[in-house]
Image (cartoon, rainbow, N blue to C red):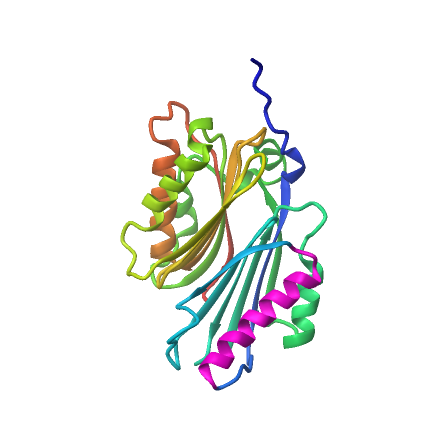
Amino acid sequence: MTTVTLDDSKYAKGTGIFSIYKNVEFPTDVKKRCMALLELGTETLLANNFIILDFIPYPGLGEVGEDEVLRYSWILSESHRILIYNPKTKTLIDELYTCSPEKDGRIMFEKTNKRLGNPLKNHMLNEIVSKEIALEEEPDKLFHSVQTASDKFKLANEKNYCVSAVFFDIPDRKLDEDSLEDMLTIALNKDDQKPVIESACRYDPQGYTYIHQSSKHFAGLHSYPGTLKSAHLSLIGSGNAILSVLEDVETVVYKSKKKEPTISIKIVAENF
């Protein structure tokens, strides 16, 4: 029996969008504020024809404190989006990762700007999950270990960061959906304060998206188990929390690997 490998090369270069909006006014009533944030995220995603598979709220849609930071994330068939709103500072953070060659998020971005005004800061970047393309186009972003990358970037423990990371050359057995879910649970839930909220979607015939939210950080992972054999990881949180997650994922992905791993790490935004 011949094993057919999925050709997922069309997803080799996706899009990342990270924006910070200031002076964002939502209703003073907490429950109405929660629903307004949910409506904003959903409406602008649908305007871009993204397919929403699931969404998770942190700290929730029930008893939310007056000053609690709201985090809503969506799992899309094209990957994920996260909105983080701080009612004290009236700041909204918006991060999208899409692997779709057709849907790069620009319509979503334009619709969001129409609602909120232009962002104070915005970064759009190519999200390369093909090792060959990364070696050609951004070799300076490639490292053989998380430690090497952290030595270069010198992540400050208390500063906030948005980081884009890709783990290449992942063994097939580690890209198996059940193994991947166990791996992420170990790496991301190790020392978080509860409650931790997570959600996952498996795709036909292959592929996996996982999003995780806690008081420490947000993580969104999308896997490519076909010809690419890689996984993209978006992280938002303090330097200390992000470094811990990257090191844990590196350990479980490359444990017992004989060759040096190749990891792409990009600092999308910092000090926000």
Q: Which residues are magenta?
A: 29-50
Relative to 236, is 131 on the left or the right?
A: right
Residue 76 location, x and y as percent?
58, 52
In this rendering, does residue 22 appear at all?
yes
Relative to 12, is 234 on the left or the right?
A: left
Give residue 64's quadrant in the image. Answer: bottom left
Q: Nearer the viewer, residue 5 or 216?
A: 5
Q: Nearer the viewer, residue 269 or 19?
A: 19
Q: Residue furthest bottom?
A: 28
Residue 34 location, x and y as percent?
49, 75
Residue displayed at 59% across by 24% down? 5
Is 1 contained in the magenta span?
A: no
Q: Nearer the viewer, residue 71 or 265?
A: 71
Residue displayed at 41% across by 36% down? 178
Is 39 contained in the magenta span?
A: yes
Judge whether 134 appears above or below 120 on screen. above
In this rendering, does residue 89 appear at all?
no
Residue displayed at 37% across by 79% down? 65
Residue 146 location, x and y as percent?
39, 42
Residue 255 location, x and y as percent?
34, 31
Relative to 64, is 106 on the left or the right?
A: right
